[in-house]
Image (cartoon, rainbow, N blue to C red):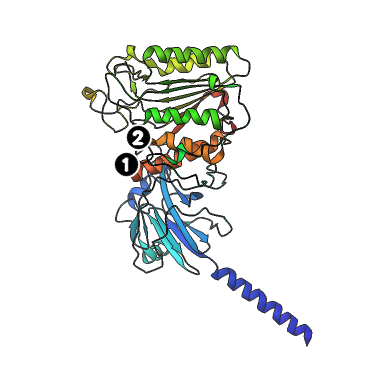
């Protein structure tokens, strides 16, 4: 009798535990576009899903996935990559619909034992909500991919309080996130992790969060040499807002966080052609003559393509956008430093080379449109982080008083105390800059990384210190 009671009790506990596990989570079902236009690009298009900045898989058109989540508030973002041959290249965030209500980037309040329907939208004729999902599955026009279980993932908190109560067949009011605070990523195989942000010290009026609470490194990084050129006030072309502040704060991070001695940081504000040449010559000498030397080049200012060759040029403060002979060739810069056989050379280029400024206006009005510059050939052990790609503009983050690209570069150095791999840094910059550029400025800006063949397979594990 006791044995039977024990078996019954054990069975009851197992059933209760199973039920408890079930009611302890909900499903968010994400559907990729299933319209005619999506069908045409089925092999070329991928929709990447992120929950609180954590990678949650990818979908192709005419696919859906169930994502298991514990009760809580989650920020969903979905963005698209499209290329002719399936190569992953970034695009802007996609709009979406949750239970039939449009949103672009939003917070979902997830309850228990419920199913939420999140549709990625390409056009208004796309499937919307539970009924459309049932119709699509019954007609076999969409297919399921393996379920993604995120119930054991420790998510960072959303950047804003949740105000989107999501429930099937319920009218909800979406809220678009326009904050410049980045969503933090946790470790995932692909893309590289974005760690949770730290809480910096209070800032003074007019200061950015990255201008204060700069981490200090007790170790001296005496093998690294830095060239910083911050050009803001130009004689013949418009001003580059925030460039000097960008350069000054980056210099502080190099000295304090990366541990580079002050005498090894060659810093130039509003550099003329002569000053730029002087700085490049000094860095070249150090990289060529000091054993194990590593170089860091930071440039913030105007760039422009040559009108005939489309080659990219840096514009000194006394240079003219209409005359490339008064400017400094980016290709020449890369070649000159690569010839030193330095241990590594890393560039941070917060500039675009399309012929437009950071506000989107043309430097040379006669050209009328922004043009993508010719890509440079990289030699040596070179890694280039660029603020934008193609014919995009490198923009500013006015509320923080920094260039958008530089702000997130500094923020990542602040959060990690400079101990960050290039792979993690690249993913962090790509995600946050692309997000804020679209949500704040409604323009695309996609940071990119280019490498020389010598470090093509190893650059992601490289570090600044």
Residue sitting at 63 percent across and 30 percent down? 219
Residue sitting at 54 percent across and 28 percent down? 255
Q: Quadrant of residue 353?
A: top left
CA–CA distance between discs 2 and 1?
8 Å
Q: Quadrant of residue 299?
A: top left
Is there a contact, CB below 8 Å, between mark 2 and mark 1?
yes
Q: Secondary structure at mark 1?
A: helix
Q: Does residue 16 appear to the left or right of 201 in the view shown?
A: right
Residue 402, given in percent of the width and then of the height, sits at: 39, 35
Q: Which disc number belongs to residue 395?
A: 2
Residue nearest the observer in this picture, 35 or 228: 228
Q: Which disc number belongs to residue 211?
A: none
Q: Is residue 202 above or below residue 462?
A: below
Q: Is residue 86 above or below residue 301?
A: below
Residue at label 1?
Answer: 441
**Who comes first in sequence, dot 2 or dot 1?**
2
Residue 350, given in percent of the width and then of the height, sits at: 41, 29
Q: Is residue 253 above or below residue 72?
A: above
Residue 114, given in percent of the width and then of the height, sits at: 47, 68
Residue sitting at 30 percent across and 56 percent down? 125
Q: Is residue 102 above or below residue 383?
A: below
Q: Quadrant of residue 205?
A: top left
Residue nearest the observer in this picture, 331 or 165: 165
Picture quarter with the C terminus:
top right
In the image as oriented, which residue stretches furthest toward the front?
204
Q: Secondary structure at mark 2?
A: loop
Residue 116, given in percent of the width and then of the height, sits at: 43, 64
Residue nearest the observer in this picture, 204 or 26: 204
């Amino acid at each position: 009798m006791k044995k039977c009671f024990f078996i019954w009790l054990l069975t009851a506990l197992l059933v209760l535990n199973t039920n408890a596990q079930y009611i302890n989570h909900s499903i968010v079902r994400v559907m990729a576009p299933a319209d005619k236009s999506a069908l045409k690009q089925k092999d070329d298009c991928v929709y990447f899903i992120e929950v609180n900045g954590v990678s949650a898989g990818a979908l192709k058109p005419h696919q859906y996935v169930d994502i298991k989540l514990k009760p809580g508030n989650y920020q969903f973002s979905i963005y698209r990559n499209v290329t002719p041959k399936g190569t992953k290249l970034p695009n802007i965030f996609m709009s979406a619909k949750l239970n039939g209500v449009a949103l672009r980037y939003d917070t979902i309040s997830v309850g228990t034992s419920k199913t939420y329907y999140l549709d990625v939208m390409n056009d208004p004729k796309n499937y919307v909500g539970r009924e459309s999902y049932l119709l699509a599955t019954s007609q076999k026009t969409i297919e399921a991919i393996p379920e993604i279980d995120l119930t054991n993932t420790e998510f960072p908190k959303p950047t804003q309080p949740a105000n989107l109560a999501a429930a099937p067949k319920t009218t909800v009011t979406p809220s678009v996130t326009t904050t410049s605070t980045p969503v933090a990523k946790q470790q995932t195989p692909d893309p590289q992790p974005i760690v949770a942000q730290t809480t910096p010290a209070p800032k003074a009026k007019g200061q950015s969060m990255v201008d204060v609470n700069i981490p200090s490194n007790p170790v001296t990084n005496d093998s690294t040499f830095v060239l910083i050129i911050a050009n803001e006030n130009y004689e013949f072309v418009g001003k580059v807002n925030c460039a000097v502040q960008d350069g000054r704060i980056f210099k502080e991070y190099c000295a304090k966080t990366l541990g580079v001695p002050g005498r090894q940081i060659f810093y130039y504000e509003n550099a003329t052609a002569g000053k730029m040449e002087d700085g490049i010559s000094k860095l070249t000498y150090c990289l060529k003559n000091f054993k194990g030397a590593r170089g860091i080049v930071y440039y913030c200012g105007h760039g422009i393509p040559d009108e005939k060759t489309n080659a990219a040029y840096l514009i000194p403060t006394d240079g003219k956008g209409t005359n490339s002979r008064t400017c400094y060739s980016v290709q020449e810069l890369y070649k000159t430093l690569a010839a030193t056989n330095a241990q590594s050379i890393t560039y941070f280029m917060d500039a675009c080379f399309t012929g437009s400024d950071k506000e989107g206006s043309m430097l040379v009005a006669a050209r009328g449109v922004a043009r993508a510059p010719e890509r440079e050939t990289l030699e040596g052990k070179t890694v280039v982080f660029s603020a934008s790609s193609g014919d995009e503009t490198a923009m500013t983050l006015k509320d923080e008083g920094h260039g958008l690209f530089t702000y997130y570069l500094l923020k990542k150095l602040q959060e990690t105390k400079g101990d960050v791999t290039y792979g993690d840094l690249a993913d962090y910059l790509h995600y946050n800059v692309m997000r804020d550029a679209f949500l704040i400025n409604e323009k695309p800006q996609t940071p990119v990384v280019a490498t020389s063949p010598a470090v093509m397979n190893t650059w992601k594990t490289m570090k600044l210190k």
